[in-house]
Image: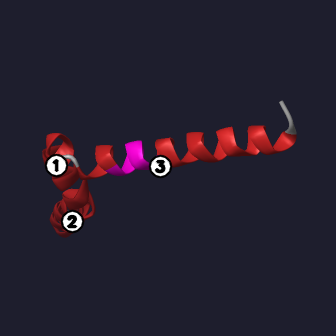
Amino acid sequence: MDINTLRGIATIFAMVAFIGIVIWAYSSYKKKDFDEAAQLPFADDDEDQKTREQQDTRSNEK
């Protein structure tokens, strides 16, 4: 087995791994999880706003 055979095997392995990741990422099985993850930055903003409002309320009470 020479270096070119190893390079060919590595290329095929990388291609199979890439195709597997693409299929996994675009499968409808994971769509719900990815949609929830896509909304996380916006949910964090809502929580930050609530925290700020609570802090403002506390500071106004003092």
Residue 19 in magenta stretch: yes
- Location of the C terminus (image quadrant): bottom left
Q: Is residue 56 above or below residue 10?
A: below
Q: Is residue 30 above or below residue 40?
A: above
Which tag, 1 or 2, sits closer to the chain's start? 1
Which tag, 1 or 3, sits closer to the chain's start? 3
The Cα–Cα distance between marks 2 and 3, rounded to whole angstroms, is: 30 Å
Disc 3 designates what residue? 18
Q: Is residue 58 above or below residue 33?
A: below
Residue 30: x percent and y percent?
A: 20, 43
Q: Residue at the location (17% across, 64% down)?
A: 46
Region rendered in magenta: 18-22
Q: Is residue 17 above or below residue 26?
A: above
Dot 2 crowding, Cα within 10 Å, few <14, some 14–19, many 20+: few
Question: What secondary structure is marked by label 1?
Answer: helix
Amino acid at circle 1: Lys
- Nearer mark to the viewer, of 1 and 2: 1
Q: Which of the numbered marks, if any, corresponds to residue 42?
A: 2
Taken as a whole, is the magenta stretch helix, strand or loop? helix
Disc 1 designates what residue? 31
- Relative horizontal placement of residue 16, taking residue 22 as reference (left or right): right
Residue 12 in magenta stretch: no
Residue 3: x percent and y percent?
A: 85, 41
**How many marks overall?**
3
The Cα–Cα distance between marks 1 and 3, rounded to whole angstroms, is: 19 Å
- Location of the N terminus (image quadrant): top right
Question: What secondary structure is marked by label 3?
Answer: helix
Q: Who is closer to the viewer here, 62 or 51?
A: 51
Q: Residue at the location (74% across, 45% down)?
A: 7
